[in-house]
Image: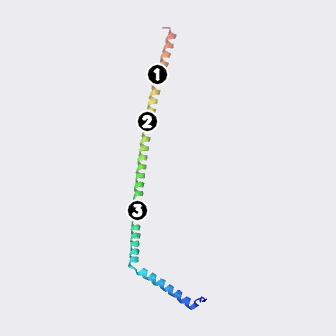
């Protein structure tokens, strides 16, 4: 039976160095490959295009937010104007109501005074007897 002989330390070290060198050469060859360079350039171009699209979206978002803020300001101004107009209408209605109430009170006073004067005159006439 033949015995298996392990390689000695120097042999193992030279094998490891050769494997490292082969791996390094393989990666260098892959890095110099035009297809890899093309993929890298394509990836960079896609990344730049993505950044441009993101910037455009951000600009559109800021524009949209500015428009919304402007619309909100306009809506607030319109609401304030409507509130002022409603207050004016309410003030006019209150003034008209107060004027009507004063007119009704004056008419009632005139009617009351007329009744009082009629009662006085009737009492005076009864006292005179004619």
Which x, y percent locates residue 121?
48, 15
Q: Compared to 89, does 116 lie above or below?
A: above
Q: Badge 2 is on which residue?
A: 93
SS of the residue under disc 2: helix
Q: Compared to 99, does 125 lie above or below?
A: above
Which x, y percent locates residue 43?
41, 72
SS of the residue under disc 3: helix
Q: Badge 3 is on which residue?
A: 57
Q: Badge 1 is on which residue?
A: 111
Identify the residue at horizontal 48%, vertical 86% (top origin): 21
Most extreme residue toward the front is 1
Distance CA(mark 3)–CA(mark 2): 53 Å
Viewer-closest of 84 and 58:
58
> Quick one: label 1 or label 3, which is nearer the N terminus?
3
Identify the residue at horizontal 40%, vertical 80% (top origin): 33
- Few, some or many C-alpha atoms within 10 Å of disc 3 (few <14, some 14-19, many ≥20)? few
The reply to whether callout 1 and callout 3 are in contact (CB within 8 Å) is: no
* 28 sits left or right of 12 in the view: left
Viewer-closest of 125 and 119:
119
- Few, some or many C-alpha atoms within 10 Å of disc 1 (few <14, some 14-19, many ≥20)? few
For residue 45, which quarter of the picture? Answer: bottom left
């Amino acid at each position: 039976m033949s015995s298996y002989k392990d390689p000695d330390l120097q042999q193992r070290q030279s094998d490891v160095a050769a494997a490292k060198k082969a791996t390094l050469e393989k990666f260098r060859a892959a890095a110099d490959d035009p297809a890899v360079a093309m993929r890298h350039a394509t990836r960079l171009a896609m990344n730049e295009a993505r950044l441009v699209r993101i910037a455009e979206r951000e600009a559109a978002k800021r524009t949209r937010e500015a428009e919304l803020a402007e619309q909100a300001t306009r809506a607030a101004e319109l609401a304030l104007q409507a509130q002022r107009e409603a207050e004016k209408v309410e003030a006019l209605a209150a003034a008209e109501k107060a004027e009507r109430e004063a007119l009704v009170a004056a008419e009632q006073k005139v009617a009351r005074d007329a009744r009082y004067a009629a009662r006085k005159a009737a009492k005076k006439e009864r006292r005179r007897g004619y």
